[in-house]
Amino acid sequence: MRYSKFLLKTQKEQPSDVDSTSMSLMVRAGMIKKVSAGLFHYMPYFNMILRKVSYQIRRAMDSVNCNEMKFPILVSRETLEKSGRWNAFGKEMFKLTDRNGVDFAISPTNEEYATLVAGAYVRSYNDLPFSIYQIQQKHRDEIRPRDGLVRAREFTMKDAYSFHEDVADLEKYYKKMGEAYTRLFTTLGLKTVPVVADQGAMGGLYCHEYMALASEGEADIAFCEKCGYGANLETVEIKDTYKEDMRFKGRYKEVITPDTKRIVDLVKMLGREPSDFVKSMVYNADGKLVMALVRGDREVNEAKLAKLLRCADLELATEKEIASIGSVMGYVGPVGELRNVRVIGDYEIKAMTNFVVGGNKKNVHYIDVNNADFKCEWADLRFADGNDVCPVCGGKLDITKGNELGHIFALGTRYTDKFGTTYIGRDGKQHIMQMGCYGIGLERTVASIIDQHHDDKGLVLPVCVAPFVADIVVVDVNKSEQMAAGEKLYEELEEKGYPILLDDRNERAGVKFNDFELIGLPIRITIGRALERGEVEIDVRKTGEKLTCKIEDVEKTIKKILKALN
Ligand SMILES: [Zn+2]
């Protein structure tokens, strides 16, 4: 591609209306152009990178015998009601009505269609496992579309679906797909962690998210370098490693603490640390009252509490409800006579001594309380932090931020049951198929590649996603010998299969060098003064390496560099 003909307009200024480094770089490198909140034009350079990423995804799908096809973007209300997702998806799904009054949705994901295809093409166990995928635009009616590509209204997704004889075969394929994801992200130069995640609206047996590590990521994740365990921060299990301390029963004292509903006020008044307190939170769990205890500087992990209680609705109790257990809002504690409330303490409190709790009377707290002074059940109720250990191997758990790139689900029979998707089994009888589904967000993948591969001058693209392997910069296009040498080298390298950008613009060399650094191609070949000696200069973007070589040795040299970069 000749730069003079290439629609690639870079900008020097930092854009003001973006929310991440990768987004800022994409705008400056002329890759995307915002249309309105959550909608973007993908400019040619971005589109080329997206195509490279798609190519690698297709190779990964080939490796697990998954067939590419395409489903309609519109899906009828009738089909989505059959699976229960017409309502389950809520307001995020775009809906529309045709001229005959038939309701459709713009398909959020395609479990329903995939199930229909499996039903139409699979006859017996001989046809299983059966797996299909597509790469298609998706639309989401985001509440708050952000300025980045991470929460856009429209994006590209690879969604794959697999069908199986039994759970064992589903698990085998799920594992294979997971390995293909790990290989794919490694090929793309991405550091990712698979984490155990929540099923959400998809339902099913279990699922994993593939998170790209990102300093500005949207999710908090914990991972163990030693064994590879990863989880969203909310779901990290904290093991009970504490012994109960029963030594100091009954030594607590009542103290009068006026106007100290908040821990900060109390900390000041009593001259103690927040970690010397036990916070008591009362919840209404499906109509039953529960008191959850955590250390004063912690928060109750409501997801863990809800899971423990197996409740659908978990809400903080009202003032009236708190009064009904024999306490007072702002002064709740586990010590003393309480009515109709289940008390659950976080494991960590087992190891605490002489702490402060609410006295269940206005303006009253108890100090020097120990865990033998009240009755409670023990459970894991808090969020993990940087000091917790891996629940699998006991290794150090790192807390970091990440962005979700892919999500894989073992769905079981959640959809195949509803659509009656059966096959003839080895016993000659009809059986319901087991199903899995596997997504990857393409724009998110590109954004993460940029997030993990840039420096203060711009992108540093890995070779496998770079639209061109090298940028030939003709220093002075008005010098005919430089221009002729550039053209000749460009033609020769293109001929040999190297995609090349020829910077033939009538611009100062400095502008061209800056653009090379900003758009982040792997190699720069500079045709300037050294041409008088029959030489060109070569710069490697990633390593900063500089060398000169004879013009006839350019191909050999860049071949070597590209091999080293891979
Ligand atoms: Zn571990």
Image (cartoon, grey):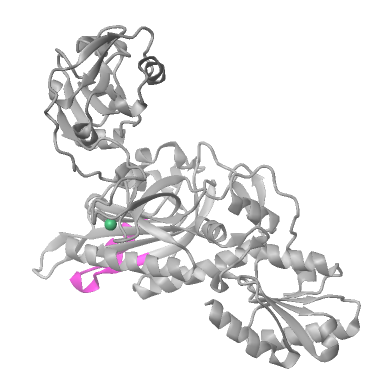
**Residues in magenta?**
112-132
Is residue 122 part of the magenta span, yes or no? Answer: yes
Q: Report the residue at 28% width, 49% height from top.
A: 389
Magenta stretch: dominant secondary structure: helix
> 114 or 241: which is nearer to us?
241
Q: In the orientation shown, which residue stands out farthest toward the left? A: 427
Q: Is residue 427 left or right of residue 565?
A: left
Measured as percent of width and height from the top left, residue 535 is found at 78, 88
Q: Residue at x 32, y 60 (%)?
A: 228
**Residue 310, visible in the rendered structure:** no
Left or right position of 92 against 557: left
Quadrant housing the N terminus:
bottom right
- Residue 166: which quarter of the image? bottom left
Q: Residue at the spot x=35%, y=39% of the render?
A: 88
Numbered circles on residues, count: 0
Where is residue 153? Give x, y as percent. 54, 46
> Is residue 372 at all visible to an observer of this figure?
yes
Query: Where is 553 relative to 414, above or below?
Result: below
The residue furthest bottom is: 552
247 part of magenta stretch: no
Q: Between residues 316 and 172, which one lies in front from this camera angle?
A: 316
Ligand 1, seen in the image, is in the quarter at bottom left
Vertical order, 269 against 290 (above or below) = above
Residue at image coords 42%, 60%: 192
Residue 426: x %, y % from top left: 11, 70
Image position of 338 (left or right of 66): left
Whether residue 565 sits left or right of residue 472 in the image: it is left
Query: What x and y, as percent, mark residue 65?
Result: 34, 74
